[in-house]
Amino acid sequence: MDISERPKISLKVAMSLDAKIATVSGDAKWLSGEEARRWGHSMRAEVDAILVGAGTVIADDPALDVRMVQGENPLRVVLDSHLRTPLSSRLYGDILAKGTLLFCVENNVEKIATLRQRGVEVFIVSSDKDGRVHLEEMLQILLKLGCHHLLVEGGGKIHGAFLRNHLVDHLYCVLTPWLIGVDGVSAFSLNSPELLSEALEFSPIKSRSLGKDTLLELQPK
């Protein structure tokens, strides 16, 4: 997909030294330190929209707003192919519903009507070969809505989908000083190739310390 047909896409992930974003139980609170979290909120203030998947909404019930720094809240985008996220989610409440966009492939008339009544914009789009939201179609819609810079903060499956489809322009990895172990939740859900030459490769741009954490900025090679 040509970049002129979609927003610029930055993917940001805070992860352990062994590339995990949570323990086996899903615990991820305070994985990164305060300085890294402040940097993350400053980045949110610089983009037009922030995107997560249904799994993140169900597990964390995020607000996806700007805190700790001054700045405007970006649009909030939820990829929820099969409308799994509960109506009780903060993103669909009185404060955050307006400015929240939901993309799905199923047409649950009653649930969609409720979401739209609350102010959530719901888009029913085509599905990809796995039955999930077709990313390129979703991105074209966001661009038409005036979104020129999208920040992806989803879980491992969302990260993997964007990376597999070569839809990441900048990758920001906040490395935290933890080792979580093999049963932790992976930051990137990707199938491993047989040959190293077939793996995704990134070129480092710069790095810096954020308190106890380290920020790496990379771009696709």
Image (cartoon, grey):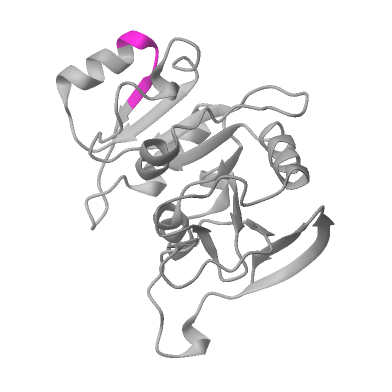
The span shown in magenta is 117-122
Magenta span includes 66: no
- Which picture quadrant has residue 172? bottom right
Q: Is residue 101 left or right of residue 210?
A: left
- Which picture quadrant has residue 133? top left
Residue 27 screen position, x and y as percent:
48, 50
In depth, the one of 35 and 115 nearer the eye is 35
Q: Is residue 96 above or below residue 13?
A: above
In depth, the one of 162 and 69 nearer the eye is 69
Residue 201 screen position, x and y as percent:
59, 75
Q: Is residue 155 left or right of residue 72?
A: left
User: Where's the C terminus, which quadrant?
Assistant: bottom right
In depth, the one of 56 and 28 nearer the eye is 28
Q: Is residue 86 above or below residue 54?
A: above
Residue 177 screen position, x and y as percent:
69, 64
Residue 144 screen position, x and y as percent:
49, 30
- Which picture quadrant has residue 85? top left
Which residue is pictured at 73% across the width and 62% down the height? 216
Which residue is pictured at 61% across the width and 37% down the height? 148
In depth, the one of 86 and 43 nearer the eye is 86
